Image (tube, rainbow, N blue to C red):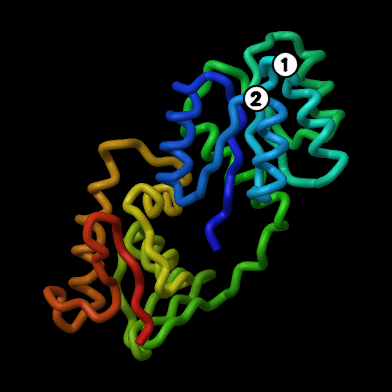
Amino acid sequence: MTQKILVVEDELDIIKLVRAYLEKAGYAVVTATAGQEALSVFRHERPNLVILDLNLPGMDGLDVCRALRRQSDVPIIMLTARLDETDRLIGLEMGADDYIVKPFSPREVVARTRAVLRRAEGEPVKPDVIAAGEISLDMPRRQASKVGRPLDLTTMEFDLLAVLVAHPGQVFTRMLLLEQVQETAYAGYERTIDAHIKNLRAKLEDDPHNPRFIETVRGVGYRFIQE
């Protein structure tokens, strides 16, 4: 299920930028530009995480954080332009999980969002073997095989295949795949995924031009098909 992020920010340019990066990373995004609106949106949308600007008109971010904590333990990341450490400490003491100081990189917002959600959910126990259909990956030994036959994969090819096989049927954008295997991703580099997928298909598929395992979802990215 797609995780939903509520972004509470009164600067529309920041909302637009953060929303674009979060959606590219695979999250659903809802927004609010004021405190009371944020509480209403939260009640209706029940997001998995809130990114909350400290400097809101009227009801400020600290008041919103206090109100949210009275009704939920949802993870909260605060955005602040304030340099006073006291403000940030107050936010953390009130229950915020993390904070980001403006100006910030939108990639940092995505990374912090992912990290806070992982902590909130608890780190999952990673299986030693990931398998789907004919494909099996021994994660500790970093060995991949097809019907028991070893596949000679590069580090990037193995990591990409592991992401896809672990989530059969799920569509991954190029940027999301890049982030999954490299932790960070840069606009303009996501097309390198196409080259790696081409090489991976050459080693994985009986006929790379008619792939059975890694399907191209036109205009979006790739997914692994489990027969």
Q: Position of residue 128 (x, y in %)?
A: 57, 75
- Establish if 167 lies above or below 76: below
- Establish if 160 lies above or below 13: below
Please indicate whether residue 68 sits to the left or right of residue 156 in the image: right
| Quarter of the figure that contains the C terminus | bottom left
Crowd rating for badge 1 (residues with CA inside 10 Å; few <14, some 14–19, many 20+): few
Q: Position of residue 43 (x, y in %)?
A: 72, 46
For this orientation, the residue located farthest to the bottom is 147
Q: Name the amino acid, label 2.
A: Ala
Of the two numbered discs 1 and 2 on the same chain, state the one appearing first in sequence.
2
Q: Position of residue 145 (x, y in %)?
A: 36, 81
What's the distance in space between the residues labelled 1 and 2, CA to CA?
7 Å
Label 2 residue SS: loop
Q: Residue at x 48, y 32 (%)?
A: 18
- Residue pointed to by mark 1: 58
Q: Position of residue 215 (x, y in %)?
A: 26, 71
Please indicate whether residue 227 sits to the left or right of residue 69 in the image: left
Please indicate whether residue 61 sits to the left or right of residue 109 in the image: right
Label 1 residue SS: loop
Q: Residue at x 75, y 9 (%)?
A: 84
- Establish if 145 lies above or below 99: below
Quarter of the view holding residue 8: top right
Quarter of the view holding residue 151: bottom left
- Establish if 155 lies above or below 49: below
Q: Are dots 1 and 2 in contact, CB under 8 Å?
A: yes
- Residue pointed to by mark 2: 34
| Quarter of the figure that contains the N terminus | bottom right
Which label is found at residue 132?
Answer: none
Q: Name the amino acid, label 1.
A: Gly
Q: Residue at x 83, y 39 (%)?
A: 69
